[in-house]
Every structure is written in structure tokens, then in C-alpha cells.
Amino acid sequence: MKALRNLLDNIKPHVQKGGKFEKFHSTFDAFETLLFVPNHTNKNGVHVRDSIDSKRTMAMVVMALVPALLFGIWNAGYQHYLAINEAAGFWQMVGIGALKVLPIVVVSYGVGLGIEFMFAQIRGHEVQEGFLVSGMLIPLVLPVDIPLWMVAVATAFSVVIGKEVFGGTGMNIWNPALIARAFLFFAYPSKMSGDKIWIHGLSDLDGVTGATPLGEAASGHVDKFANGAFDLWHSFIGMIPGSIGETSTLAILIGAVLLIYTGIGSWKVMVSVFAGGYLMALIFNLWGANELMQVDAIHQLCLGGFAFGAVFMATDPVSASRTEKGKWIYGFLIGVFAILIRVFNPAYPEGVMLAILLMNTFAPLIDHFVVQGNIKRRVKRAKVNA
């Protein structure tokens, strides 16, 4: 590390103001602060300082996403060999999965960071670190068969329209990764319908299409949920078709533990999302008017992107509610609306994305009413005491 530090110190004078490559200061600063804790100090006022900055916070979220990513790679290979009815070893499955998943991750980071660096250079600002997380989230919410050019277009739309037009990281209204998925859903619905997923096929075929559990339920095939391929155990572990990082509830919960332990993710939002979804699913179990209503409430929480959305999407600190009471309301309504959309919209059995984007829109309003309620209670208490 000392050699790397010396190398950066030798380059630094050339990219600072007056240097030969001063135009690239933003790019250099991004790499330097990613590798080393910045040594900047505040000259005015009193501030609490520690070694945690935005880049390290984002890096911790990426680490929490790694279990879902690794399982998604394995599951892509597992679904391939399951579809062609051929036995394969662990590393064979990982190899097939990596061939499909890793290019999506590379394109997402390449396009997103390229745009981030371009905006930073044009504005003369520091490169914002928000895309460290979005660059990983975008591939994990996409199906494995998504064309790479679609990934590039959706990522560009997410960064430019979903974030930069609002002022960059910390100013966006909606979760940027979900903006990318929403763009693909409305622009290319056949690829993002939520009812079918492409599985890597034989060498002489483009591939085969397998129905996701939610697609089967929407079609009335709920018999597979009790003791078939989509039973609760398989759904919890993640050995089912689905988007890359959303199938394994177990891997997602491992990431949730890390986020909660480090204090980066809000456990209140996570718990309230699951509570809202579970309560709504229980009510529909009693109603039982269609096939999706008959799916067990616990099972509902393990299907589609519900768990992934609850842990990694709903907890986005920028687009979520920020008041403590508001977090409970915000998360609970996400869970309720996710199951409502899933049950009543057979054309789109995966409702978590739309539920989170809807509540992103109303999060400031929720916080406003919470704050106003607190003010009214304090004023009333002050009058009583007087």
C-alpha cells in the first residue's frame, strides 16, 4: 500500500490546479479517495470526524450484495442444466452463470461510471460515489437474458434522468436502480414482464423460456407451490427461475444482517415492509378469490423481488422516509402495495418495483406529516405546562 500511496503522491501535483492535467482532477480524486481515506480537514466550526465516508458506506452495501450476486451466478448455471436435464458439477454451473451475469455487471459499471466521470469533469466537481451501489443493484434486478445494449441504455437513463437531472447523488427522488428497471419494463415489457425468465439453452438453440413461480401462480398452476419445484424451501434458498439477485431470500437476509449490524440499512424499513406484505397476504389468504391470493403468506415474501426490494431498495436513505415514525409507515405501505399489485395485476405479477417507486414519491409527504404532528404535540405540551 505504501508503494501505491507514493505513486499517487507523485501523480497528484500534475492533476491539481496549474498542473499539466488539471482537467482530470475529478477523475484522480475519485480513485484516490476510493483507495485511501481522504485527509481533508474542516477549517471552520466543530465537526465529528471518523474514517467512514460515503465511499466506504457504499462499499459496505456492495459487500452486502455479494451473497445475492454469487448465488445468482450459480443459480443461472443451475437453471441451465435443469432445463436441459443434464447433471453438472458446482463449478460447471458457476462457469455458465458467470458467462451470462458478469458481462451485465461490467456493462452496468462501465456505462454508469463513464457518465458519472463525464458529468464530474464538465462541472468540475468531485465524482459522486452513489453509483458504486447502483452499478451492482441494476444487474441484480434484471433477468439473465437481458441484451447488453438494453443494460447500457437503461443504465444511462437511470444515471442521467433518474439522478443527474436532480443534482446528483443525494438529490434524486426515486431509487436510480429501480428507474433503470422501470425504464426497461415500460420500453421492453416482453423482457421484464415478471412471469417468464430466459434460461441458457443448448449450443444449437438460443435458449428456452421457463415460467417464474409468480408466472405459474398467475396462470393458475399453484399446485407446484405445495410440494413441487417452487415449494417454500426451494423459494427460500433460491433454486427457482427469476432475476439474477432476487431469487435467494437466504442470501438476501445475509446481506440484511450485515447492513443492520453496521447501521447502514434501516431495520425499521425492512421489518415494516415484511410486516405489511405478510398482513396483506394473510388477508388475501382468507379471501382466496384467485390463484395468487391462495399462495401462503410466508411463501409470498420469498417470491419475486419482495425480499430484495425490502432489504436493498426500500432502505435507500435518499429516496426513503427519514423520520423514525415515517420509516414504519413508508415500509408498511410498500409491503401492502407490493402484494396488492401482485395479486390484482395478472399482466405484471411482480409488484415490488412499482410499490417502492410509488412510496419514493410520497416519502417526503409522509415525513412532512410526521414532523408537523411532532410540532403540534410539542406546542400543545408547552401550552399545558404554561
Image (cartoon, helix red, strand yellow):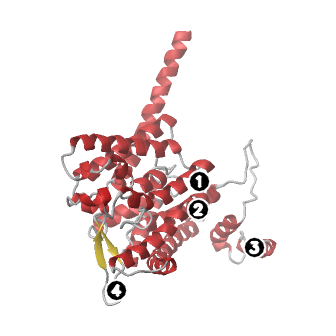
| Viewer-side residue, 250 vs 226 | 226
Q: Quadrant of the C terminus?
A: top right
Q: Which residue is drawn at the image coordinates 47% and 22% (left, top)? A: 376
**Number of marks:** 4
Above or below 39: residue 145: below
Q: How would you rate the neighbour count of disc 2 (Cα within 10 Å): few for under 14, some for 14-19, many for 20 or more? A: some
Earlier sequence position, callout 4 versus callout 1: 4
Label 3 belongs to which residue? 8
Q: Secondary structure at mark 2?
A: helix
Does the CB distance between marks 1 and 3 fall below 8 Å?
Answer: no
Does the CB distance between marks 2 and 1 fall below 8 Å?
Answer: yes
* Three-letter amino acid code at the position of disc 3: Leu
- Image depth: mark 3 or mark 4 in front: 4
Q: Residue 306: x percent and y percent?
A: 39, 54
Give the left or right position of residue 190, taking residue 6 as reference.
left
* Three-letter amino acid code at the position of disc 2: Met
Label 2 belongs to which residue? 63
* Three-letter amino acid code at the position of disc 4: Leu
Q: Residue 310: x percent and y percent?
A: 44, 51
User: Which residue in the rendered view is the most extreme toward the front?
Assistant: 227
Label 1 belongs to which residue? 258
| Viewer-side residue, 126 vs 76 | 76
Spatial CA span between label 3 and label 4: 48 Å
Spatial CA span between label 4 and label 1: 38 Å
- Image depth: mark 2 or mark 3 in front: 2
Earlier sequence position, callout 2 versus callout 4: 2
Q: In the image, which disc is placed on residue 202?
A: 4
Spatial CA span between label 1 and label 3: 32 Å
Q: Secondary structure at mark 4?
A: loop
